[in-house]
Image (cartoon, coloured by chain):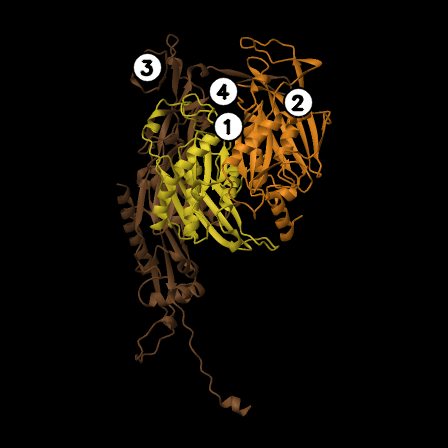
Chain colours: A orange, B brown, C yellow
């Protein structure tokens, strides 16, 4: 799928003008409608399936394991697979590097079971189809999956430093995992305008892209710029970063509410 | 028709600048140069490129304190090409301690183990940078294998020199200060004798990463020489285990619910104490390479008025030292690689016959040159 | 899962790399801090352009190959930039993320439309890497790429630069008026250093101070380039 030079030029003009009009009529800060289904994988601790209006689709599974946290430092691990891309491609590896950095900001003390042992969480992401840069979709999916994750209930004692004992769990009682995963927003910069969640045709004419992470009421690191195409890429006014962060701070809370 | 035949056709000779000729016909360009008495690189026939060394400034023991894992290094620049060698270490648990046990069992102390089994090699990975990504090339694989084999058969690296003599880290219960004590240090008299009774044995392993930049010709001898220099700069850190770990036992559950007990040690390297790797220095030798090529009589640039006929039967060949440039690499089919020490002791010689006329005099000559080159290379490090 | 690399001689699988115990001498490193970058160009004869950028904590060798033909069969009106970073210290995953970022930045200044149907491959080798965080390398990486591109006679529209401040790398063009790239990493707290990082400084202020600093570093770069 590609756009002709004329199509791109038309899109760029309409999106960079002061009264910008998006091709699908959305407001600048409006996301595309998404459908989320949770808990559809019976063998996972938590799962989510997320579908965007353009047909982009992503499934996420959360599994867990008991580890000695003195040995394993990273208690959450994200693995990303994108259909049609090689595992070692630039796109897959950089998205997976980005998400492992984002996930590191989650407070992992919630995963501690006993003084010696912790849960280790494995998040497997499979992007079935995607037409625009998929990090936003993936992060919403991870958010929904983690929010619907239930882990086995511990019945042995918390203090196991002195006793040689492996943690034992209740036969069927589960505890809801209580974490607040960060969200990631992709913003396109076209001219002096900023657009949330650019669709494929908007990405093709974006001058630059911003990846902004947000957690618990404020913008956090990592923040990145990213080229969304290879024809229109150029610099932008530094103050747009400020505006973008302000926009995210303003609307992210509403998005979280909707996802919950 | 008849008019056409009578017309004279002028044939203009096409001429190229030397650079263009060297690209489109490297063989001819090389022959023309040789007939003038020098090589396309403007070197003499038996002239080597000069080398520049940058000894061991990449490792943690280099001039500035660095916090990396490199324990020996070398940067060798030869002509345009430069080779960066870094040596890192590893530790392996010796699974076979049977050698001593075997001797005891048989009761013979002087079992003649073949000499070679007392030596080991370094694990080299060569990367030749030429602007491509992906799997390693045949050249890189061949270079690594040759380096591995020749280090082993040169008997440079005795296994004895890589034995680990671990110290013990003792934590003082009163003030929480940790200190490391080695079996050979002076202040261990206060300790009980059995502290150093660790049933496991370890050895160091050496890994070399050799990166070649700006390759202009064959690079084996550059890699070898750089590796030799780097090996001589290697410092092994002292290693120790923690006191608490000396009698540590770990329960391992297997599927059949049989609990097995295995001793585990975490062995750490001392950041401050190290010693030079004891190589068999008399076995250190340096590499050089040569090519022999037949002179093409037709390429000879003769003086305009000379009447003598070119004798097509007498083939002349010349010896070229230190092959460089694309033209020489592609046109010279008879190549000789020599690893020799400064006394003329040979560690390795390989001759690819090719098509050139190789005379015994040439071989004598090149062995002499190798010795001289080895002298020069050896002096560089002193 | 027993995949073995049969192409390289890697030694026995059971060996463990040397692990150095924590040394107390780490402070001595920051004492001799000389952040000024030194440049060199044109040292590698089998590439189109090359550069070395170093200070006393890092040495980066950048090689530019191209513009050369790509394997792409379909017509590409623009040149494709590809960057491969090689390092012993950092994970490939993180290096790939960084190369994608650098590609984005370079796309802003290389005249891509001048080289249709071709590709520019940039190989960056980390030879000395005493800096712990990738973000600290970004200014040297950007300068290295710019010098190597000029050395390869590839047309660029602007001499861009980058500044790393407070764990945030900012790439700026047109003397600081245009923001080309922004990279902010979450900070991992090490036990022995926490002093020079302040999370409360807003991004816009970091960008402002980078805009002031960029002029000095750009002047240094231009001085070198005009003597090339």
Residue C186's tag is 1
Indicate the position of residue A103 as horizontal and vertical percent values: 57, 27
Element assignment for label 4: loop
For the residues carrying marks 1 and 3, which lies nearer the camera in this image? 1
Structural distance between the alpha carbons of marks 1 and 4: 36 Å
Is A179 rendered above or below residue A192?
above
Q: Nearer the viewer, residue B55 or B232?
A: B55
Q: Is residue B117 left or right of residue B306?
A: right
Name the residue that disc number 4 marks: B264
Residue at 65% of width from left, 10% of height from top? A155
Quarter location, residue A151 = top right
Quarter location, residue B279 = top left
Name the residue that disc number 3 marks: B188
Structural distance between the alpha carbons of marks 4 and 2: 40 Å
Q: Quadrant of the C terminus of chain B?
A: top left
Residue at 63% of width from left, 46% of height from top? A11
| Residue B149 visible in the snapshot | no
Structural distance between the alpha carbons of marks 2 and 1: 23 Å
Name the residue that disc number 2 marks: A147
Q: What chain is tagged by disc 2? A: A
């Amino acid at each position: 799928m590609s756009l002709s030079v004329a199509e791109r030029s038309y899109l760029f003009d309409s999106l960079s003008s002061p009264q910008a009009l998006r091709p699908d009529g959305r407001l600048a800060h409006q996301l595309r409608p998404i459908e989320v289904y949770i808990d559809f994988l019976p063998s996972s601790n938590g799962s989510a399936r997320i579908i965007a209006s353009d047909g982009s689709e992503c499934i996420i599974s959360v599994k867990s394991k008991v580890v000695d946290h003195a040995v394993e430092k990273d208690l959450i691990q994200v693995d990303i697979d994108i259909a049609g891309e090689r595992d070692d491609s630039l796109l897959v590896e950089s998205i997976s590097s980005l998400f492992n950095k984002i996930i590191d900001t989650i407070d992992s003390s919630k995963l501690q079971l006993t003084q010696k042992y912790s849960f280790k969480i494995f998040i497997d992401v499979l992007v079935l189809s995607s037409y625009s840069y998929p990090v936003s979709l993936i992060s919403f999916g991870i958010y929904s999956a983690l929010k619907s994750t239930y882990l086995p209930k511990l019945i042995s004692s918390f203090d196991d430093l002195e006793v040689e004992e492996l943690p034992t769990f209740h036969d069927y009682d589960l505890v809801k995992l209580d974490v607040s995963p960060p969200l990631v927003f992709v913003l396109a910069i076209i001219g002096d305008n900023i657009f949330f969640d650019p669709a494929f045709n908007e990405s093709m004419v974006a001058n630059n892209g911003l990846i902004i992470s947000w957690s618990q009421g404020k913008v956090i690191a990592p923040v990145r710029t990213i080229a969304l195409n290879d024809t229109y890429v150029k610099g932008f006014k530094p103050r747009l970063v400020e505006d973008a962060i302000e926009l995210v701070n303003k609307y992210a809370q509403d998005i979280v509410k909707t996802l919950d | 028709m008849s008019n056409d035949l009578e017309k004279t056709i002028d044939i203009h000779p096409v001429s190229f600048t030397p650079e263009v000729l060297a690209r489109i016909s490297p063989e001819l360009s090389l022959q023309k140069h040789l007939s003038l008495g020098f090589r396309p690189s403007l070197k003499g026939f038996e002239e080597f490129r000069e080398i520049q060394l940058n000894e061991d400034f990449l490792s943690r023991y280099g001039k500035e304190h660095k916090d990396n894992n490199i324990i020996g290094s070398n940067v060798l620049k030869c002509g345009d090409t430069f080779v960066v060698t870094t040596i890192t270490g590893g530790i392996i648990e010796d699974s076979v301690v049977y050698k001593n046990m075997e001797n005891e069992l048989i009761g013979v102390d002087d079992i003649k183990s073949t000499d070679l089994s007392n030596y080991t090699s370094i694990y080299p990975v060569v990367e030749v940078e030429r602007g491509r990504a992906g799997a390693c090339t045949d050249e890189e694989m061949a270079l690594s294998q040759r380096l591995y084999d020749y280090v082993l058969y040169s008997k440079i690296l005795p296994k004895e020199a890589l034995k680990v003599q671990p110290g013990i880290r003792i934590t003082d219960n009163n003030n929480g200060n940790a200190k490391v004590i080695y079996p050979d240090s002076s202040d261990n008299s206060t300790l009980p004798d059995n502290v150093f009774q660790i049933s496991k044995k370890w050895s160091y392993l050496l890994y070399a990463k050799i990166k070649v930049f700006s390759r202009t010709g064959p690079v084996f001898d550059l890699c070898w020489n750089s590796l030799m220099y780097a090996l001589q700069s290697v410092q092994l850190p002292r290693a120790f285990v923690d006191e608490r770990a000396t009698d540590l036992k770990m329960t391992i559950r297997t599927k059949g619910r049989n609990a097995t007990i295995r001793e585990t040690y975490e062995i750490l390297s001392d950041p401050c104490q190290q010693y030079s790797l004891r190589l068999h220095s008399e076995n250190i030798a340096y590499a050089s390479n040569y090519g022999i090529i037949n002179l093409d009589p037709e390429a000879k640039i003769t003086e305009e008025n000379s009447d003598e006929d070119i004798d097509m039967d007498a083939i002349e060949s010349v010896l070229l030292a230190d092959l460089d440039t694309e033209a020489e690499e592609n046109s010279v089919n008879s190549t000789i690689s020599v690893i020799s020490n400064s006394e003329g002791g040979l560690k390795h010689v390989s001759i690819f016959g090719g098509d050139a006329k190789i005379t015994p005099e040439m071989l004598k000559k090149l062995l002499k040159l190798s010795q001289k080159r080895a002298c020069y290379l050896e002096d560089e490090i002193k | 899962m027993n995949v073995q690399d049969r192409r390289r001689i890697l030694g026995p699988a059971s060996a463990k790399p040397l692990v150095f115990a924590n040394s107390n001498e780490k402070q001595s490193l920051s004492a001799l801090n000389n952040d000024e970058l030194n440049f060199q160009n044109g040292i590698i004869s089998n590439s189109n352009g090359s550069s070395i950028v170093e200070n006393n904590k890092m040495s980066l060798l950048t090689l530019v190959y191209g513009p050369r033909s790509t394997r792409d069969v379909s017509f590409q009106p623009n040149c494709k930039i590809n960057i491969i970073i090689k390092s012993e210290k950092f994970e490939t995953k993180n290096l790939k993320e960084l190369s994608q970022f650098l590609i984005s930045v370079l796309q802003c200044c290389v005249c891509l439309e001048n080289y249709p149907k071709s590709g520019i491959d940039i190989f960056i080798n980390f030879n000395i890497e005493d800096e712990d965080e990738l973000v600290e390398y970004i200014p040297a990486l950007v300068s290295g790429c710019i010098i190597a591109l000029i050395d390869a006679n590839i047309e660029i529209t602007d001499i861009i630069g980058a500044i790393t401040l407070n764990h945030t790398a900012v790439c700026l063009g047109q003397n600081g008026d245009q923001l080309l790239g922004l990279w902010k990493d979450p900070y991992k707290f090490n036990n022995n250093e926490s002093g020079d990082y302040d999370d409360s400084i807003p991004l816009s202020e970091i960008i402002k101070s980078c805009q002031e600093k960029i002029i000095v570093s750009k002047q240094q770069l231009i001085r070198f380039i005009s003597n090339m």
